[in-house]
């Protein structure tokens, strides 16, 4: 009888421990996570971790792509579709802590170029990405303008473009929309997760290795 009781205690203990372990790995969709921990299939060119950007200043301490988990899930879904067509997503920018937004605003205090940190942007909410596509050789597809080009040519509505550019933009937009994102009219590279504006502006930071 004592052996049976001891066995039942062991079953109860290990069963409960397993339950706790399963609960511990559950991550809320709004949690900030590193995209690299969820997929190795992306290409990175994190512009604001360098001086190769319109600010001409490095504003990130290191090049990492953090997003809310639900944004990561949608982005991985989109990238899987692109990979089947022979392309991959290349990232220019992801989540942007509010302190970084303030730093950018100090450099360029113009709402036509930088979102006012008093209001915050979808980047500050972990629901926006700036992206393009690369082919199997890592070459960027021609999108008509560079990233962060502030002119009418960067708009989705600009029609005076070569057919190849139009085709590439349509491909990017179509798959991103099917994967749960919405486009930003004036910037072909900018995509917001649907309903991301409902999230709070965040100043969550990540550690640099």
Image (tube, rainbow, N blue to C red):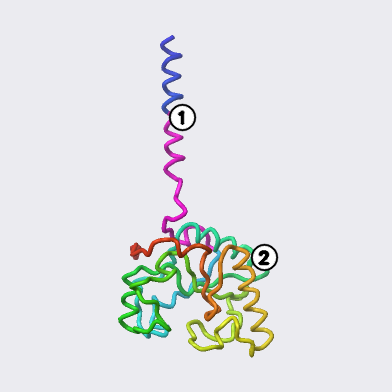
Work out whether 112 lies above or below 100: below
Left/right of residue 19 with respect to residue 163 in the rendered view = left
What is the span of residues highlighted in magenta in the rendered image? 14-40
Q: What crowding class fits label 2: few (fewer than 14 Cα within 10 Å), some (14-19), or many (20 or more)?
A: few
Figure quadrant of residue 87:
bottom right
Residue drawn at x 58%, y 75% as measured from the top left? 133
Work out whether 174 lies above or below 71: below
Q: Earlier in the sequence, mark 2 or mark 1?
A: 1
Q: What crowding class fits label 1: few (fewer than 14 Cα within 10 Å), some (14-19), or many (20 or more)?
A: few
- From the viewer's side, name the closer residue of 49 and 189: 189
Instruction: Inspect the magenta stretch and tell me whether residue 82 lies in it.
Output: no
Instruction: Inspect the magenta stretch and tell me whether residue 37 lies in it.
Output: yes
Q: Of the numbered discs in the image, which one, if any, rests on residue 15? A: 1
- From the viewer's side, name the closer residue of 105 and 8: 105
Number of numbered callouts drawn: 2
Residue drawn at x 48%, y 86% as measured from the top left? 150
Residue, far top: 1
Which residue is label 2 attached to?
84
Mark 2 to mark 1: distance in Å?
Answer: 41 Å
């Amino acid at each position: 009888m004592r052996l049976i009781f001891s066995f039942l205690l062991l079953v109860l203990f290990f069963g409960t421990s397993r339950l706790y372990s399963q609960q511990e790995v559950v991550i809320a969709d709004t949690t900030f996570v590193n995209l690299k921990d969820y997929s190795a299939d992306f290409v990175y060119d994190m512009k604001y971790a360098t001086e190769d950007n319109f600010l001409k200043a490095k504003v990130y301490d290191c090049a990492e792509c953090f997003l809310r988990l639900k944004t990561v899930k949608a982005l991985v879904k989109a990238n899987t579709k692109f990979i089947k067509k022979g392309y991959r997503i290349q990232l220019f920018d992801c989540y942007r802590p509010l302190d970084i937004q303030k730093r950018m605003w100090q450099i360029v205090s113009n709402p036509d170029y930088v979102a006012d940190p008093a209001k915050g942007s979808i980047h500050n909410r972990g629901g926006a990405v700036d992206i393009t596509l690369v082919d199997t050789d890592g070459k960027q597809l021609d999108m008509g303008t560079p990233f962060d080009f502030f002119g009418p040519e960067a708009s989705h509505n600009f029609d005076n473009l070569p057919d190849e550019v139009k085709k590439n933009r349509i491909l990017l937009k179509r798959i991103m929309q099917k994967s749960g994102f919405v486009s930003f009219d004036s910037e072909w590279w900018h995509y917001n997760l649907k309903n991301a504006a409902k999230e709070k502006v965040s100043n969550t930071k990540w550690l640099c290795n």
